[in-house]
Amino acid sequence: IMNNIYLNNIISNTGLSYGIALWYDTQVTVLGNNGIDINNVFAGKELDDTSGNKFTEDSYPNLIPEACAVRIYDDELYQVVVNYDENENENDNLISQKCIAGHTGCLFDHTMYSHIGNVNNDEQECVNNLAPNYDI
């Protein structure tokens, strides 16, 4: 059960950053008006993405720094199941996620920054001196 989880300023200088990681064969229920609140997750903040040293999906040993508010690790046999409080209405903020940035998003997808819910990466709200090289 996840209820009133608040995470803020999860920052990695050179690697990945996750707010929450859910692993194989896990069942989670999110409860409450503010079940999960994740803000300011930055991956690879010290790595200059404009230097010409571009990461690729197979840049071993250092993979492209991945930022993900909620990262799910599962497969068809060992699935992660996320349930939501059925007593909450659609307008309640069971999950709030904002200002999640890295050199890529979840699973190397530059458009997905969480596996559950929506992420608010509004530039006006997410301006942060800690992450000057990100396209938010």
Image: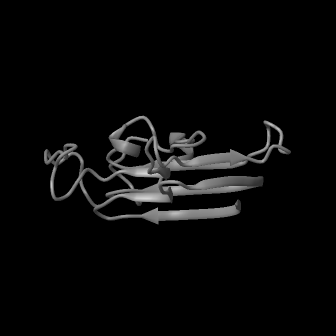
Residue 45 placed where, x, y %?
33, 58
Of residue 53 and residue 18, the one placed in the foreground of this image is 18
Q: Is residue 92 visible?
A: yes
What's the coloring here? one colour
Residue 65 placed where, x, y %?
30, 53
Where, by quadrant of the figure, is residue 12 drawn? bottom left
Where, by quadrant of the figure, is residue 16 drawn? bottom left
Q: Is residue 105 visible?
A: no
Residue 52 placed where, x, y %?
13, 44
Q: Is residue 88 left or right of residue 107?
A: right
Q: Residue furthest right?
A: 87
Residue drawn at the location 78% of the way across and 48% of the way down: 85
Of residue 25 and residue 101, the one placed in the foreground of this image is 25
Number of marks drawn = 0
Q: Quadrant of the N terminus?
A: bottom right
Residue drawn at the location 24% of the way across and 47% of the way down: 49
Q: Is residue 126 left or right of residue 109?
A: right
Residue drawn at the location 14% of the way across and 48% of the way down: 53
Q: Quadrant of the C terminus?
A: top left
